[in-house]
Amino acid sequence: MSVVQIGFDELNNHGDLMKPAGSLSDSNSQAGSSSNSEQMANTLRVLLQYQSSPNFGTSHLPFVPTRSMLLAHGVTPPDEQTQEKIASLTHAAQDAATSLFCGSIVAGHTGESDEYADVGLWLGEGSGGRGYGKGQEIEVLRALGLEIAADKIATVQLNPSWNLPASVNVSASTPAVEALTIALTSLEGLHCFFATVGHRSGVVVACFLLGKSPHGWCGLVGMGDSSDE
């Protein structure tokens, strides 16, 4: 699958930029992904807006449109099977969010807006053998061109029943939540964290749910916002 470098111009004229993966046969999932196209674009816009790492510049993000998958700077896409799994995870996350009436399943019900949707994320192995597990949150952010102070990062506990962040209010399961829970079991070292990336009309928080696949670290990134206290 081809990687495109997307910036604000591409996102403002995204069209089919975030079309569903062609290998996915479920028409309902494809329709859901299409309806989330603008919300995914909003998530990517925020990541672009707050990029600050001098190593990468601030104008573009590497993205695989047919997999709805963002890449860390400087890494190549994984094998096709892993790409398909990330695409399926992304679709499952969006379906679960819809079933629970929230925009991002990672941000959950803590956000005050449904203008964002979760995007798939491929980070790779990481450098120095440390990977991107719990405790490496700053390295995750740097891999996406974000420089965030440690005191702006908060670990989020996972609900052991669903493998979902505690930010998600799951009073009763839905088929979509169960499907997402199953998809997440394929990842080891699952962890979640929120990072305050900036302010607009309120606080803007990047929300990550990450784990390790057999070939590297991957997961989901979403956005949440709330009014300033």
Image: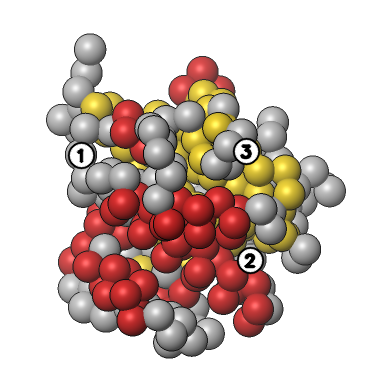
Q: Amino acid at mark 3?
A: His
- Most distant residue in the right direction: 129
Mark 2 is surrounded, within 10 Å at the Cα level, by few (under 14), some (14 to 19) or many (20 or more) other residues, namely some
Label 2 vs 3, first from the N-terminus: 2
Q: Is residue 85 visible to us here?
A: yes
Tell me whether circle 2 and circle 3 mark residues in contact (CB < 8 Å): no
Q: Nearer the viewer, mark 2 or mark 1?
A: 1
Tell me where residue 73 appears, x and y as whole percent.
56, 60
* Total numbered labels: 3
Residue 108 coordinates in the image, percent (x, y): 37, 37
Q: Residue at x 25, y 45 (%)?
A: 101
Image quadrant occupied by the C terminus = top left
Image spot of residue 39 (x, y percent)? 25, 57
Whether 171 is drawn above or below 127: the answer is above
- Disc ID at residue 75: 2
Compare residues 38 and 103 and report the one nearer the observer.
103
**Three-letter code for the amino acid on which mark 2 is drawn:** Val
N-terminal label among 2 and 1: 2
- In the rendered image, is residue 10 in sight? no
The amino acid pointed to by label 1 is: Ser
Disc 3: which residue:
191
Point 50% across, 53% down: residue? 178
How many neighbours does mark 3 have within 10 angstroms: few (below 14), some (14-19), or many (20 or more)? many
Q: Residue at x 59, y 56 (%)?
A: 182
- The residue pinned by badge 1 equals 113
Of mark 3 and mark 1, the one earlier in the sequence is 1
